[in-house]
Image: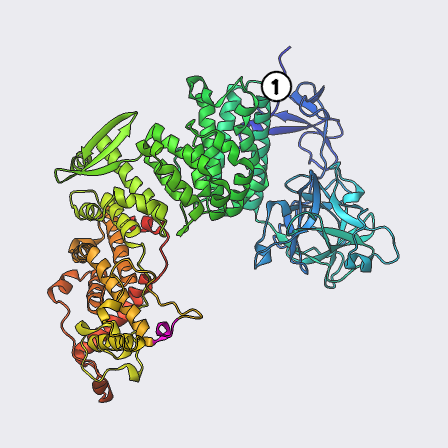
């Protein structure tokens, strides 16, 4: 006897899928038409063995019998569905919809709460409530019929079931024993004591408890079809009750309850209607994939966790599945026939709806279930075993899992919070085993101030420092720096901890230091306990010739400079005071000017100049120059741009100001004869530079002359600071005057240009440029952006005619040159000063500059 041939379904219409129908009884003869109700024998064309139903039950489906090719069995032909022309506007059995309560503006949702499935209306904080879609609010429509036809088009007089797509349970109604008072329920229940609420059928069976009727909100004939996007009222057939919303919260312990019970009452309320919102087929396919993926991962993880060995096919299958999940989240699914890119390196913009889907369908939960296996089965299998060649497949699987997690949380706050709150400790325990746990943690907390404040402590920072000591990879410097700043704002608590950990003596070996030897800048570092040193120029030359070690060391030092900038950002003096000693201003400027160094390194030093030497006390923001004037502010005497002074804002010259200050001081002291020189405060180390106008102060502090005196003192401080950074200002002016700067052809140079422009902006921000210099700087910038830098350099800013009240009164204006100056000032106001007085840019804009 030959072995039976088990049939199997196929997606492709191959030759093996053809059958010959032969009649069972002699009532029919070959060639007769086949009609509904006939019994036939199915004869495969290729196998020439009839289909036969065996008496053997399938091991995985006890209620199902095996179908094989053996003895003849008769098959009765029954009608499955009427053949009607498809109408996409009509509700049909098998359609997937969301039920949106039109009055409450909430979706009917099914989700777990305290271990059991609950049906509720979910509150959303979105402005447009219909955008708050969820995979847990999808319901498959089933049209109930008495004949064997399954579903078909839905009519108003049909009966319906609603199957929750994510769980497979049917919507039902049952008696509600909750005694919580609700005004709507009290109104609609009438004289009845029994009240109902919506739930799901626990037995997952098609019973009368799961059958509903649909009623139209407008007059419709009962035999008409139901439009797909229509408003309906739901009536539960068994209890003869109408579905309505309540204000009873299910999640009562939550700070802001979002789950509200759905009731059913015998009285119909017109406003208790739901909008049927069709779900696109792609969303349904995405849900099916995510749901099946979660179940498959859970099966494999549970098997390994129980101590059983996964077969080679199971390992291959789960690896393929996790790879598919990576491409699924970033929207780059590949077909079986195309060559697949590497899942670990493939980049893409994650799809936000799919990020939400992998969280809601517990794909992330099951992935962490996989990652938790080494903790569950110790000492049989530990994380350290992943370094063994025998566990290469497991190591690759763990890397893929972390890649899915990294894509799933990217720019998605809710996923980030769930991962951090539930699984951060697990990821921390797997740092250092080269499975990308540290990369995922860094990406998780980056630019999320809430997570940084809550989850980052000295222990986590020290862990990154230890990894840095072990591998000397620059990415760990970047990760530590990212902890200090979030979206352009300093996280001061974390910043302070980073300063304490990174700058303490025991961790000095992870940092490169800089010194001057024989007028040459030398870098010193420690690697594997061995001290090394090399001049900066030697490293730069080696990097140009392709020396990997020199390139790595320069990149490491560049990343270290960026770390220092983030540590000092927003005037963090725990770092500034120490780093200022490590990187004095003259050395920083020398390195920034050195054309032999890579542009990225020079950009790092330029950024250090901003954060360590410029954005510090006593620098204060100055008000922008006011380009509009009142008539009373136009001086009678001639004023040129080069002679412009802040004192002219009050219509007073510098000499008259000094005279008035002296007179005010003498008058305030009576006849003491104290000289002006004796009363002026020290030049550098004064107390606060702004006047204190508190209650009970001396009259002299409230005198206008005293305010001018303080202004004079501020000016002296400003001049001293200006002398300190004078060479930096000269470098900025010389660099921006180079034609090569404005070609934007070199991406690395663009990064340096960005930092130099930021440096210029900050010096403008702190008032180091007078009006004449400011106009020249603005002209250079505008000419550079217009690609006319050579013309701007050949025709320097010419002296402008006097602008006085007399010339304006005469209606002559400042002349042609003055008109050009006005245009220049207008352009400056719109293109430069807008940025000059803006807040600190997000550091991500550097990437844009490079691109």
Q: In which quarter of the image is residue 466?
A: top left
Query: Callout 1 environment at 10 Å: few (<14), some (14 to 19), or many (20+)?
Result: few
Residue 344 visible in the current orientation: no
Q: Provide the residue span drawn in magenta.
A: 698-703
The chief SS type of the magenta part is helix
Left or right side of 3 for 518: left
Horizontal and vertical percent for residue 799? 14, 74
- Tell me: residue 196, above or below residue 531: below
Horizontal and vertical percent for residue 432? 42, 28
Horizontal and vertical percent for residue 247? 72, 55
For label 1, the residue is 5
Magenta residue check for 626: no
- Tell me: residue 306, above or below residue 657: above
Left or right side of 281 for 594: left
Residue 216 visible in the current orientation: yes
Left or right side of 621 for 731: left
Residue plotted at (27% across, 38% down): 557
């Amino acid at each position: 006897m030959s072995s039976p041939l088990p049939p199997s379904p196929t997606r492709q219409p191959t030759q093996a899928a053809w059958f010959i129908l032969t009649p069972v009884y002699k009532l029919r003869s070959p060639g007769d038409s086949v009609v509904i109700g006939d019994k036939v024998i199915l004869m495969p064309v290729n196998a020439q063995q009839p289909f036969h139903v065996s008496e053997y039950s399938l091991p995985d489906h006890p209620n199902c019998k095996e179908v094989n090719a053996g003895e003849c069995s008769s098959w009765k032909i029954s009608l499955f569905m009427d053949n009607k022309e498809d109408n996409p506007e009509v509700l049909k059995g098998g359609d997937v919809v969301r039920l949106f309560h039109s009055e409450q503006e909430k979706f009917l949702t099914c989700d777990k709460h305290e271990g059991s499935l609950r049906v509720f209306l979910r509150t959303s904080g979105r402005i447009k409530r219909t955008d708050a879609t969820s995979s847990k609010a999808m319901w498959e429509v089933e049209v109930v019929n008495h004949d064997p036809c399954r579903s078909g088009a839905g009519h108003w007089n049909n009966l319906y079931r609603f199957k929750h797509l994510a769980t497979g349970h049917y919507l039902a109604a049952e008696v509600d024993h909750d005694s919580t008072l609700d005004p709507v329920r009290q109104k609609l229940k009438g004289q009845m004591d029994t009240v109902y609420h919506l739930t799901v059928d626990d037995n997952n069976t098609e019973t009368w408890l799961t059958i509903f009727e649909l009623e139209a909100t407008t007059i419709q004939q009962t035999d008409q079809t139901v439009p797909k996007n229509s408003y309906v009222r739901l009536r539960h057939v068994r209890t003869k009750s109408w579905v309505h919303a309540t204000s009873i919260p299910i999640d009562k312990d939550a700070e802001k309850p979002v789950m509200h019970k759905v009731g059913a009452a015998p009285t119909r309320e017109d406003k208790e209607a739901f909008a049927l919102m069709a779900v696109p087929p792609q969303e349904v396919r995405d849900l099916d994939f995510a749901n099946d993926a979660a179940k498959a991962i859970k099966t494999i993880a549970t098997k390994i966790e129980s101590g059983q060995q996964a077969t080679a096919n199971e390992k291959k299958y789960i690896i393929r599945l996790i790879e598919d999940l990576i491409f699924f989240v970033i929207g780059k699914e590949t077909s079986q026939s195309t060559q697949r890119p590497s899942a670990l390196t493939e980049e893409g913009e994650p799809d936000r709806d799919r990020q939400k889907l992998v969280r809601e369908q517990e794909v992330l939960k099951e992935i962490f279930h996989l990652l938790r296996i080494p903790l569950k089965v110790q000492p049989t299998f530990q994380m350290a075993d992943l370094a063994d060649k025998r566990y290469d497949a497991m190591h690759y699987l763990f890397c893929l899992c972390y890649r899915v997690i990294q894509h799933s949380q990217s720019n998605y706050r809710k996923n980030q919070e769930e991962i951090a709150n539930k699984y951060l400790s697990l990821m921390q325990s797997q740092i250092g085993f080269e499975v990308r746990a540290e990369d995922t943690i860094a990406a998780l907390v980056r630019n999320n101030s809430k997570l940084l404040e809550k989850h980052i402590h000295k222990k986590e920072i020290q862990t990154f420092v230890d990894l840095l000591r072990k591998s000397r990879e620059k990415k760990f410097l970047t990760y530590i720096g990212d902890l200090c700043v979030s979206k352009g704002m300093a996280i001061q608590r974390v910043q302070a901890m980073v300063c304490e950990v990174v700058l303490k003596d025991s961790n000095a070996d992870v940092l490169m230091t800089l010194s001057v030897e024989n007028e040459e800048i030398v870098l010193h570092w420690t690697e594997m306990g061995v001290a090394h040193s090399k001049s900066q120029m030697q490293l730069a030359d080696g990097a140009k010739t392709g020396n990997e070690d020199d390139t790595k060391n320069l990149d490491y030092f560049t990343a270290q400079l960026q770390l220092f900038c983030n540590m000092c950002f927003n005037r963090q003096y725990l770092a500034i005071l120490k780093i200022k000693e490590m990187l004095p201003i003259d050395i920083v400027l020398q390195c920034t000017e050195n054309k032999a160094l890579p542009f990225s390194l020079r950009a790092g030093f330029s950024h250090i100049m901003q954060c360590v030497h410029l954005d510090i006390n006593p620098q204060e923001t100055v008000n922008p120059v006011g380009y509009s004037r009142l008539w009373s502010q136009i001086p009678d005497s001639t004023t040129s741009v080069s002679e412009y002074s802040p004192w002219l804002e009050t219509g007073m010259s510098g000499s008259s100001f000094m005279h008035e200050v002296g007179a005010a001081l003498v008058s305030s002291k009576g006849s003491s004869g104290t000289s002006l020189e004796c009363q002026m405060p020290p030049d550098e180390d004064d107390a606060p530079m702004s006047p204190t106008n508190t209650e009970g102060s001396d009259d002299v502090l409230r005198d206008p002359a005293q305010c001018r005196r303080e202004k004079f003192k501020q000016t002296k401080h400003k001049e001293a600071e200006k002398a300190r950074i004078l060479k930096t200002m000269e470098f900025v002016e010389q660099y921006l005057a180079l034609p090569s700067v404005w070609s934007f052809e070199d991406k690395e140079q663009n990064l340096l240009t960005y930092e130099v422009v930021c440096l210029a902006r900050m010096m403008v921000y702190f008032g180091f440029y007078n009006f004449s210099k400011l106009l020249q700087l603005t002209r250079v910038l505008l000419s550079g952006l217009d690609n006319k830098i050579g013309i701007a350099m050949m025709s320097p800013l010419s002296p402008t005619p006097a602008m006085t009240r007399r010339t304006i009164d005469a209606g002559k204006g400042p002349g042609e040159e003055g008109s050009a100056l006005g245009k220049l000032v207008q352009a400056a106001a719109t293109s430069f000063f807008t940025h000059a007085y803006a807040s600190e840019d997000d550091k991500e804009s550097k990437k844009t500059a490079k691109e």
